[in-house]
Image: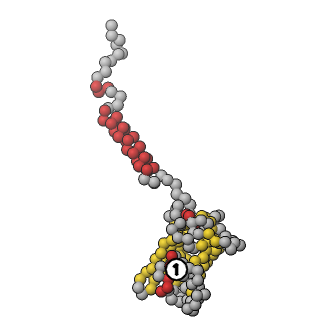
Amino acid sequence: MTHKYRKTMDKSDCAVSPVVGILLMLIVTIILASVISGYTSGIAKSQSKAPQMLIEASLINTSQGSIYDNESLEIRVITIDGSVNTKDLMIRTEWENSTGIHTKLVKPYENIYPIGFAPGSQTGSNFGNYSLVAGTRMNVSSKKEDNPNALKTVIDNWTSISDNTPVRIQFIHIPSGAIIVDNEIIAEM
């Protein structure tokens, strides 16, 4: 005996059509693919916050033709957010004359200069091996009797710099990729 309210199902009574099911699976696949792509391409990574820093610098050449001549770049950290290790920094110098733009990029551990001196210390450390705090001195000195080629490791073609030449100094924070210092100093020759 058949129940009078019972109805036999046919194809038109299906709950979800095959087209809707395929579309739902396709949407879920696209969402998963975009999330995975975001993580693997670095979009979803959090970046380091760049510190804030203020410096004062000078570039001096006291050459008179003797072995006691001194050409030096002196940088002093005035203020900085906390402490920043120089292994996380690159220094870029740039200046221009009639022969073109002269640029040098100093990376940690590739060069010992600039030598860093902690506040109140007379003992220096190689670039990449010290931290910057307020009061840190950074120095590159080309005393003729010590290292006559030191300054060329930080400033390209520095012997061609004349008095009152603007020299740009930038500190680049490697983890964030941000320029945290962008100063221009005037060479005193």
- Can residue 142 be seen here? The reply is yes
Q: Position of residue 172 (x, y in %)?
A: 52, 68
- Three-letter residue code for mark 1: Asn
Which residue in the structure is indicated by mark 1?
Answer: 149
Foreground pick, 23 / 4:
23
Quarter of image, res 171: bottom right
Image-based side of 160 in relation to 83, left or right: left
Image-based side of 24 in relation to 71, left or right: left
Image-based side of 99 in relation to 145, left or right: left
- Can residue 151 be seen here? The reply is no
The residue at the point 58 percent across, 90 percent down is 66
The residue at the point 31 percent across, 32 percent down is 18
Q: Secondary structure at mark 1?
A: loop
Q: Is residue 52 above or below residue 2?
A: below
Please identify the residue farthest to the bottom as the structure is shown.
64
Please identify the residue farthest to the left as the structure is shown.
11
Q: Position of residue 154 (x, y in %)?
A: 52, 76
Q: Position of residue 180 (x, y in %)?
A: 55, 69
- Which quadrant is the N terminus positioned in? top left
The residue at the point 32 percent across, 32 percent down is 17
Q: Residues within 10 Å of mark 1 (few under 14, many from 20)?
A: some
Please identify the residue farthest to the top as the structure is shown.
1
The residue at the point 35 percent across, 28 percent down is 15
